[in-house]
Amino acid sequence: MTATEPPVPECDDDQSAVTDSRSEERTDDRTISRRGALRAIGGGVAATAAAGAVPATASAQSDGTDLEAWFDNVSNYDGVVDRTESDAVTVEVGVEANDGAFGFGPAAIRVTPETTVTWEWTGAGSSHNVVDTDGAFESELVDEAGHTFEHTFESEGTSTYVCVPHETLGMKGAVVVSESGGSGDGSGGGTESVAAPFGDPGARRLGGLVLGGVFALALASPGLFGLFVLLKERSGGADRVNE
């Protein structure tokens, strides 16, 4: 009696297709998860770098005066000129600016408390005066070359002033009074340290580093989570291969 061979099971194309589809889905899931993890890591690194690159200065003075906005229409403003090493400073009245002799030179200066600022008229641009916007000081309206007017700034803060007849032309100025100097290059740009509450310059630098480290740790957490997901997906893929 001849033994009957067992029938060879036919390949079920539908079943094979389903298996391949599931395999592809698992592969796609792993790919998507890895891409998501990489994006999370990249985002965390970028955020950390951004936190470390937080600028140490802000555009407004510590007393709230925004010099960039104040000098928006002043052609000869090129930052705050540091005059903190002198206790007597001279500013010219009627320098070439704003399409004529309608400027203060320098337009903005930085001095220390108890500094006396003297405004000296050039005699150009007709009659000028020097008037504080808060009423702290006011000169006569004159056009005489060599005429002077002075004011002593006793406390810290920012004083803005104008020549009343030519204010609309951009004849404006500012005196920033602070204990320490600006950037040291003669053009502080009207900025103050964000870390000023930390006190002296060394403490401010340390305070800035501490704040940067706190922000970096806070923003790095998405990246750490992404790395965890990536490692977990790799481990899961290895287990499926072993099965």
Image (cartoon, grey):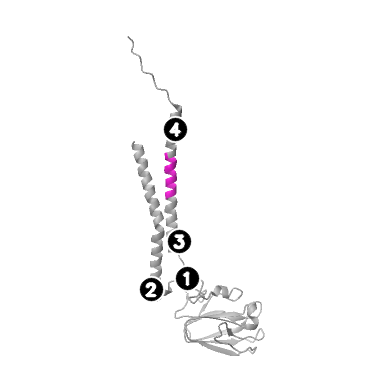
Q: Which quadrant is home to the N terminus?
A: top left
**Earlier along the polypeptide chain: callout 3 or callout 2?**
3
Q: Residues within 10 Å of mark 1 (few under 14, many from 20)?
A: some
Q: Which residue is mark 2?
A: 203
Element type where label 1 sits in the image: strand
Residue 116 in percent (x, y) is at 51, 87
* Neighbour tally class for label 4: few under 14, some 14-19, many 20 plus, Cα within 10 Å: few
Question: Residue furthest toward the top?
Answer: 1
Separation of residues labelled 1 and 2 (CA atoms): 15 Å
Region rendered in magenta? 26-37
Q: Looking at the image, tell me whether mark 1 or mark 2 is earlier in sequence order.
A: 1
Q: Residue at x 42, y 56 (%)?
A: 44
Query: Secondary structure beneath disc 2?
Result: helix
SS state under label 3: helix
Was residue 16 drawn as part of the magenta stretch in this picture? no
Marks 3 and 2, how far apart in space?
22 Å
Q: Which residue is mark 3?
A: 50
User: Quick one: label 1 or label 3, which is nearer the N terminus?
Assistant: 3
The residue nearer to you, when weighing 20 against 91, is 20
Q: How far is the residue under mark 3 from the one under mark 4?
A: 47 Å
Residue 18: assigned label: 4
**Disc 3 residue type (three-letter):** Ala
- Measured in 3D between alpha carbons, the distance from the residue under mark 1 to the one under mark 4, in whole angstroms, is 61 Å
- Tags 1 and 2 touching, CB below 8 Å: no
What amino acid is found at the position of numbered circle 1 in the picture? Thr
Q: Residue at x 36, y 46 (%)?
A: 232
Residue 167 spot, x, y in % from top left = 63, 80
Task: Tell me which numbered mark, 3 or 4, is placed earlier along the sequence.
Answer: 4
Q: Say the numbered circle drawn on residue 57.
A: 1
Which amino acid does the dot numbered 2 rest on?
Ala
Return the mark for residue 238: none
